[in-house]
Amino acid sequence: MKNTLQSRNFRFDIQQDGSSQNVADFLWQVVDVTVPSLILSETSISVPGISNLRNAGTTMTLGDLDIEFLMDSEYAAYTNLYQWIMAAHIKMDGNESSSSYKKDALLMILDSTQNDIVTAYKFYDMYPTNISPLSFSYGESGAIDAVTCTVTFSFQGQEMLDGTLNPIII
């Protein structure tokens, strides 16, 4: 039996450049990433006397990238994401170049033995579109749980990569 892929073996990196907001505080706090859905449209051909025949369509739809992260006590991760989403809003409202707030990111899936890259997903021109509400409470037993937050990213394109970070091409 082969080793199973462990859901906790992943690493998420966002491209850093001199003009971008600092996202390092956010990256260290990531606890959950959901790989976006990939939906291929279908076409249906009606054949008299036979049921409809289904074929692959021409439209590909990519879902959103949802990431849950732990809130740090200094609020740095949330603040940096807040600044990023506000910068995206201001840039688009002022009709400025959209490339200044978009970043590329890499989700690396690691093996369960040596943390080698098994596969990866590259997201192009990613930007945040939603930061979830924050919930503060004492909980039922009076224990204080870690505060988490989810951020949703949209992106222009996605590519699946092999273990050496080369594109998987059909």
Image: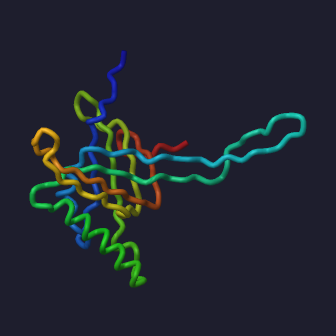
Percent from the top left, x then y, of residue 4? 33, 24
- Identify the residue at image location x=25%, y=64%: 81
Q: Relative to residue 82, is residue 50 drawn left or right?
A: right
- Identity of the residue furthest to the bottom in this view: 94
Quarter of the view holding residue 75: bottom left
Q: How many marks?
A: 0
Quarter of the view holding residue 134: bottom left
- Identify the residue at image location x=35%, y=60%: 104
Q: Relative to residue 130, is residue 20 drawn left or right?
A: left
Judging depth in this view, the residue of 43 and 163 nearest the camera is 43
- Identify the residue at image location x=23%, y=68%: 21
Percent from the top left, x then y, of residue 123? 40, 55
Report the quarter where the N terminus lies.
top left
Quarter of the view holding residue 53: top right
Report the quarter where the C terminus lies.
top right
Compared to residue 18, the image places residue 38 above or below, namely above
Judging depth in this view, the residue of 156 and 118 nearest the camera is 156
Q: Relative to residue 158, is residue 9 drawn left or right?
A: left
- Identity of the residue furthest to the front in this view: 140
Percent from the top left, x then y, of residue 132? 31, 57
Judging depth in this view, the residue of 136 and 152 nearest the camera is 136
- Identity of the residue furthest to the right in this view: 49
Compared to residue 96, the image places residue 43 above or below, namely above
Here the colouring is rainbow
- Identify the residue at image location x=30%, y=73%: 86
